[in-house]
Image (tube, rainbow, N blue to C red):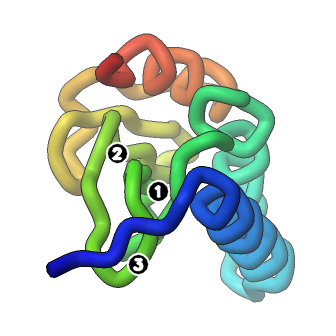
């Protein structure tokens, strides 16, 4: 039977995960790291996304309504692409909702596609 944290515990774990992601993104030595860091920061700046538990896989930013180890996916997937664009998609690494020149545009679309 899964253990569900209370609201305060969820908020604490979510904020800790955001801070870990932001720190990790600021320390990456890769050429694409500044774009990835910009995406993380733009998502963190959106209160609707900041309230969700963030996690990454293959440098794609995803969101959950529960914390690890049992993640419950919600909302679209955000990506930083090699061509300098930012993608938003309903699937993993598939920017079928749109490609954007700025991370803010991608985040704005992701917020609009959050389920209620």
CB under 8 Å between discs 1 and 3: no
Residue 96 appears in view: yes
Residue ID at (15%, 80%): 1
| Residue 25 appearing in the image | no
* Label 3 neighbour load within 10 Å: few <14, some 14-19, many 20+: few
Marks 2, 3: nearer the viewer: 3
Q: Is tag 1's residue or tag 3's residue first in the polypeptide sequence? A: 1
The foreground one among 76 and 105 is: 76
Circle 1 sits on which residue? 61
Quick one: SS at disc 1?
Answer: strand
Where is residue 69 shown, x and y percent of the image? 34, 83
Q: Which residue is mark 2?
A: 77
Measured in 3D between alpha carbons, the distance from the residue under mark 1 to the one under mark 3, in whole angstroms, is 15 Å
CA distance separating discs 2 and 3: 18 Å
Question: Which secondary structure, mark 2?
Answer: strand
| Residue at x-position 39% and y-position 60% | 66
Q: How many marks?
A: 3
Label 2 and label 1: CA atoms lie apart by 6 Å
Q: Quadrant of residue 108?
A: top right
Eyeballing the image, is 66 above or below 20?
Answer: above
Q: Are marks 2 and 1 in contact (CB under 8 Å)?
A: yes
Relative to 19, is 60 on the left or the right? left
């Amino acid at each position: 039977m899964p253990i569900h944290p209370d609201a305060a515990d969820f908020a604490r774990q979510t904020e800790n995960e955001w801070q870990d992601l932001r720190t990790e993104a600021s320390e990456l030595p890769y050429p694409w790291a500044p774009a990835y860091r910009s995406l993380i920061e733009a998502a963190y700046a959106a209160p609707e996304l900041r309230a969700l538990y963030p996690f990454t896989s293959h440098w794609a930013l995803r969101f959950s309504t529960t914390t690890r180890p049992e993640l419950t996916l919600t909302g679209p997937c955000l990506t930083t692409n090699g061509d300098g664009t930012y993608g938003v998609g309903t699937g993993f690494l598939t920017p079928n909702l749109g490609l954007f020149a700025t991370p803010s545009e991608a985040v704005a679309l992701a917020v609009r596609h959050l389920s209620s």
